Amino acid sequence: MAGDWRARSGEPAARPREPEPGRLPAEVTGFVGRQRELAELAGLLAGARLVTVTGPGGVGKSRLALRAAARAAGAFPDGTWLVELAPVQDPLLLGRAVLEALRLADGTARPPLDLLTERLSGRCTLLVLDGCEHLVQACAELADALLRALPGLRVLTTSRAALRASGEHLLTLAPLPVDPRPSGPGGPGGLPDAVRLFAERARAVLPSFALTEADAEAVSLLCRRLDGLPLAVELAAGRLRALSVEQITARLDDRFRLLTGGSRTALPRHRALRTTIGWSHELCTVQERLLWARLSVFAGSFDLEAAEYVCAGDGLEAEDVLDLLDELVGKSVVLGEDSAFGVRFRLLDTLRDYGGQWLRAAGEDQRLLRRHRDWYLGVATWGEVEWFGPRQAETAERTELAHPNLRAALEFCLAEPGEEQIALLLAGTLWFYWVGCGHLGEGRHWLDRALALDREPTEARAKALWVTGHLATLQGDLETARPALEECRRQALDTGDDRALAYAVHRQGSAALIGDEPDRAAELFEEALWHYRTIGELNSNVVLAMVELGLAYLFQGDPESGELWFGQARELCEEHGEQWAYAYVLYATAYAHWMDGAVRAARALAREGLRLNHLFHDLLGIALAIDLLALLETEPGDPGAPGDLGGARVLQGAAHRIWGAVGLPFLGSRSFFGPHQECAERARAGLTAQEYERCYQAGARLDLDAAVSRALGGSGSAGGPEPGSGPCAVPSAPTPAPARNS
């Protein structure tokens, strides 16, 4: 044996070579963000002996691990060692690679594990294994064996997949934030970390680069399109030599060709985005790659049931999707996210684009897009059914989660010849979401496009017409609403479509109500309700027809008839657990109570209606309720106490901001404008001109949540100064408003 020659010659045997103090490579570029993750990783290293940082390729696992290891080096007096595993392709050479990194190369035939155990015995050491994903099994076995034999050893690994070794603790690294950091106890807000990273790398490439306020928005959009993935952000910054930020963003549809040219000293797979993602692809099995490709048809998040329906078939069994999806999550290809309805999944856009290229290459894209369309047509159809009932709020939340995929399904139908009727059906079926959850403008967008593509007088077109008329009415656009509703009515009469006729007449009544024709509106609502009863229709629209009929009577000066209809609508809502239309029942009843002088009851009803409107993010309902509450603020509170004219004016400013996201303020209606006008007149009479304007502007600075909070009786200071202090220090008006009974 070569190691025995000293003993045979009488010389003392050589002592085993001791490991030198470990050294980590110095950072050559600035480290941006990740303070929370560094703190979390430090905590894990303090309490666990095996920690793995996982995440998709290019997310910054190595940088984070090395920064954390450097910070923790003082706790390991016998060294902190980095073992870069990218060059090691043979699992049998893993142990030798660790020996070489620790400068413990040995020419004997002894197993590397024995040598490592012997040389590190009794030492307090941190071992960093960087890039384990292609040697997961070997790394897990080596780490497990070393940790069992060496009590003073701790192991930190980076990998796109967890080792699944005993005692392993995981830190899953997400992309950098792309939204501005909010102000809070930790200090003021600021630029998102992804934008800061881009700016720093940009200055290295283009020293004259300066991030101005105007540039920040363009860079933020670019970083959002890149998912905040650090490698992609850095590669994009490198393109500033030849392209502007806007040009880079415009070319992201071919991001894999664009984002190349990384550092020549970086690992080969980190010099271009395609090779980084391609490395993850190579680590997947054939079945995992197939599922990855098929999952690329999803936009945004999706659940297991959707994946099983859309992706199964032609070589992939539905019962295998769960296990394959779990493996893709484990390999950091798919992200798992908790939601109120269980775990949901998502592909980063970069990985989605990569999978989409493979899907198109396999010729499967059209089939998968149709299955995706079918699933989300089912989601919309079921949502419409569930909207009238106790699961209404859940339906709103589920539809919100499905929103990106619903958009993708609509886009497919509108772009694919022969799918026009399904586009009409899908866009029309989503009326409850467009109206009930604050998406009037988007609903119009999809419906207008679908109606322009196919004029065949089908049930789907009839539904799309009345929904378009309804949305346009709520935006105050009667020039569009009236022709659409009349076309729907004529088509329904010609084709014998009784359901479409009922909805057309109902929404013509809505247009008449908004157009300040309460007498005509009442006639149409009565007719619509007759049609609804005849065909056995009962849903939120029917409830709203009752509410609108009551308002028509109210605007005619017949509050008793109005309140009778409000009472019927309220009974139906309570019987069926309906909450969204119930908010309008409460608004209308509050309006009637105010007219009767029952201010306290009116305020309670209006606030409860506002709370429900806010639950559904119904911007129209929120704006109406806040404006009514503004008027109620001008009423006296306790006996002898004046109304809060300053507070009322603040709420008017807040409502004005919300109306801008709805359409024409007060729907363009004199009747609905009445409470606002009376409130403004009272405030103008009791405030100075400066106070009147200052309070209004303070309200206009409130964001939606703060405006609602203020109207419900909170401070509502988020998004702007508190109206009762600072630039709007008007707690009450010097002149009390006319007294009303409370």
Image: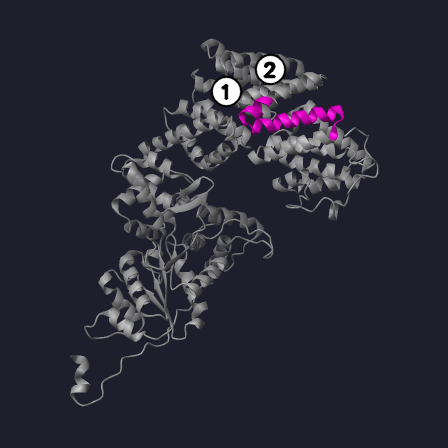
For residue 45, which numbered disc appears in the image? none
Q: Is residue 293 above or below residue 128?
A: above
Q: Quadrant of the N terminus?
A: bottom left
- 554 or 151: nearer the viewer: 151
Q: Quadrant of residue 457?
A: top left
Q: Residues within 10 Å of mark 1 (few under 14, many from 20)?
A: many
Q: Is residue 428 left or right of residue 644?
A: left
- At label 1, which amino acid type do we have? Leu
Q: Does 637 sit above or below residue 725?
A: above
**Label 1–label 2 contact, CB within 8 A:** no
Which residue position holds label 2? Answer: 525
The type of residue carrying mark 2 is Phe
Residue 275 in the image, given as x and y percentages of width and height: 32, 52
**Residue located 44% across and 23% down the image:** 424
Residue 253 occupies quadrant = top left
Q: Secondary structure at mark 2?
A: helix
Which residue shows up at 26% across the image and 60% down it? 138
Query: In terms of secondary structure, where does tag 1 sit?
Result: helix
Farthest residue, direction bottom: 10
Q: Main secondary structure of the magenta part?
A: helix
Q: Is any atom of residue 515 visible in this view?
A: no
**Residue that lies at the very extreme toward the front in this rendered image:** 575
Residue at the spot of label 1: 465
| Mark with earlier residue (1, 2) | 1
Tell us which disc is closer to us: 1 or 2.
2
Where residue 19 appears, as percent x and y from the top left, is 32, 76
Magenta stretch contains residue 585: yes
Picture residue at 81% right of the left edge, 32% below the top: 737
- The foreground one among 235 and 95 is 95
Q: Which residues are magenta?
A: 571-599
- Is residue 428 in view from this perspective? yes
